Amino acid sequence: MSAPKMRNLTMTAALHAALREEMQADESVIVFGEDIAVYGGVYGVTIGLQGEFGPDRVRDTPISEMAIAGMALGAALGGQRPVVEIMYCDFLAHAADAIVNNAAKWRYMSGGQYSLPLVVRSPAGGGGRTAAQHSQCLESWFTHIPGLKVVMPSVPRDARGLLRAAIRDDNPVVFIEHKYHYGYKGDVPAEGEIIPLGVADRNQPRVSPAGRPPSWATARCTEASKMSPTTNTLAIGVSLSCAHSTFTNRRVLIRKSVTSSLVAWSSMWMLARTFLPSAKSRTNELPATR
Amino acid sequence: MAVYEATREAVAQTREQSMPSFLVFDTYRFVGHHTSDKQTYRSAQEPVEEFRARDPVHLLEKAMIDDHTVDIPTTIAYRDRIREEIDDAFARARKGPWPEPVDPLKHVYAEGGVPV
């Protein structure tokens, strides 16, 4: 079998491709949020979707995250597969009731009668001097909520494959994108690929960062790589690319056999249940970068 | 009926003028938040019975009887049927097996989705 044809895409383009592919495959997939239709989203992920799929399926909303999440809840109960964008994850605080107390709970409280197939996409991350209300990483809030799936992709290939799986999933999924990672490039299979949620990511990360990771991230990853050489290091979301370059450099620097491996993990809600018990090394250490 | 009329008027006004309407309701609280609520926030002298006499549920029933929308035997039959349904539900629950310890963990997540 020949190697699949690859395209080199940014995170933004990979996410855009996932939305487009799922909208083409399934008419019930609808997209809405603040400034996502005419403008195409503050990070450009939804550019062109309204032109291609029309104003009924791609809508700008008023500036009310509560309304956006509530609409997603109602649309999902009504048989649609809404994918909504919350402009910054900090604003998920406004939307939390619909996500945490409603979307995550209704299947359980109805004894399995309802499905809530909705995706909340939201950029997170600090370090860009955007002040305290636009810099948080709040994935851990949602990771603590039973009934929610929380996904943080590391590389464009995962971003595309996991977003497609998230849209197809019958559960509410909080999909966190790092706002300083949108420009990172990586190889993505030209043919549609769907990566199942909750399955361990690859041990061999496919990273070809287009830009240098921020220095604070590199510093943290360097700390992690100094741990015992037999230790797995867990890299969550964007930190994978930083950790990967640090590890690679370190291997060159110390010129000795490094047996530690770097493990990427995107399915936040499965971390404690399936990943941690299997990944712990015999030294009982698991440095993590985030 | 006053609520019905006021709501109809407000909805019509909103539709015609594309403007928001507000309805303000003065309500009365008959019972506490839950069975253990001692209701220390109000006086024991409150004229609860006076308000009960104005309970809109009862007033509506009375109005429907007065204008012959329903007759008294029909309302009694309704009450009996509802009481029976509730009693049956309690009886079934009391006779039913206790859930298994794993049962409360069911239905946290849906299994399905659009096939890949």
Image (spheres, helix red, strand yellow):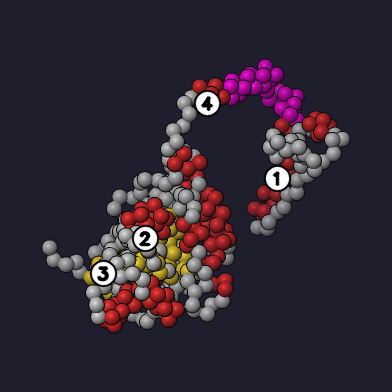
Which circle's residue, 2 or 3, is located before the other in the chain? 3
Q: Amino acid at mark 4?
A: Ala
Foreground label between 4 and 3: 3
For disc 4, the chain is B
Q: Which mark is residue A259?
A: 3
Is A171 above or below relative to B86? below
Q: Which mark is residue B7?
A: 1
**From the viewer's perspective, is residue A245 above or below residue A122?**
below
Viewer-nearest of discs 4 and 2: 2
Pointer 2 residue: A284
Q: Main secondary structure of the magenta part?
A: helix
Q: Find the magenta span and give its range.
A: B58-87
Residue at horizontal 47 percent and vertical 71 percent from the top: A125
Q: Amino acid at mark 2?
A: Asn
Q: Quadrant of residue A189?
A: bottom left
Which numbered disc covers residue B93? 4
Asked if marks 4 and 2 touch (Cβ < 8 Å), the reply is no
Picture coordinates of residue A15, whole percent (x, y): 37, 67
- Tell me, yes or no, whether dots 3 and 1 are on the same chain: no
